[in-house]
Image (spheres, rainbow, N blue to C red):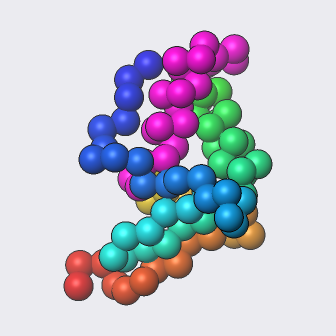
Amino acid sequence: MTQATTTGPFLKYSGQFQRWQGEDDTIFIWMDDATFQTYVQGYLAVRGITEPTLQERSDAVQHCRARSYWDGVHDPGKVHIRYVRERGK
């Protein structure tokens, strides 16, 4: 399994809010842990991995933490995406 190419993880788990969240100058994304884990499982399933090794699961989590993974995701009520300002400005 190849790792995501990012400058670092975008989403981080917040124990204070008990959710995964990330933000930059254009976007703020958050979701509960169950939703994040569903996306991790989906990422693995698409790759045909039904019983992931610890390394495969870790790689999948890292991939799903990447900002680019969430571009184009539309899952209202589960994945909350707020644009801080228009892209490109």
Residue 26 magenta: no
Q: Position of residue 26 (x, y in %)?
A: 36, 76
Q: Main secondary structure of the magenta part?
A: helix
Identify the residue at the far front of this view.
16
Instruction: Tally the numbered discs.
Output: 0
Identify the residue at the far left of this view.
89
The residue located at (69%, 14%) in the rendering is: 51
| Picture quadrant of residue 32 | bottom right
| Picture quadrant of residue 30 | bottom right
Residue 58 magenta: yes
- With 11 as the anchor, is 88 left or right in this view? left
Examine the rendered structure and indicate whether residue 4 appears above or below residue 52: below
The residue located at (67%, 33%) in the rendering is: 41
Q: Position of residue 4 (x, y in %)?
A: 37, 36
| Picture quadrant of residue 20 | bottom right
Q: Position of residue 78 (x, y in %)?
A: 72, 63
Q: Locate the C terminus and report the quarter of the image it occupies.
A: bottom left
- Residues rendered magenta in the picture: 48-68
The residue located at (74%, 69%) in the rendering is: 77
Q: Locate the N terminus and report the quarter of the image it occupies.
A: top left
Examine the rendered structure and indicate whether residue 51 appears above or below residue 31: above
- With 71 as the anchor, is 32 left or right in this view? right
The residue located at (50%, 54%) in the rendering is: 11
Q: Position of residue 27 (x, y in %)?
A: 43, 73
Residue 35 visible in the picture: yes
Residue 74 visible in the picture: no
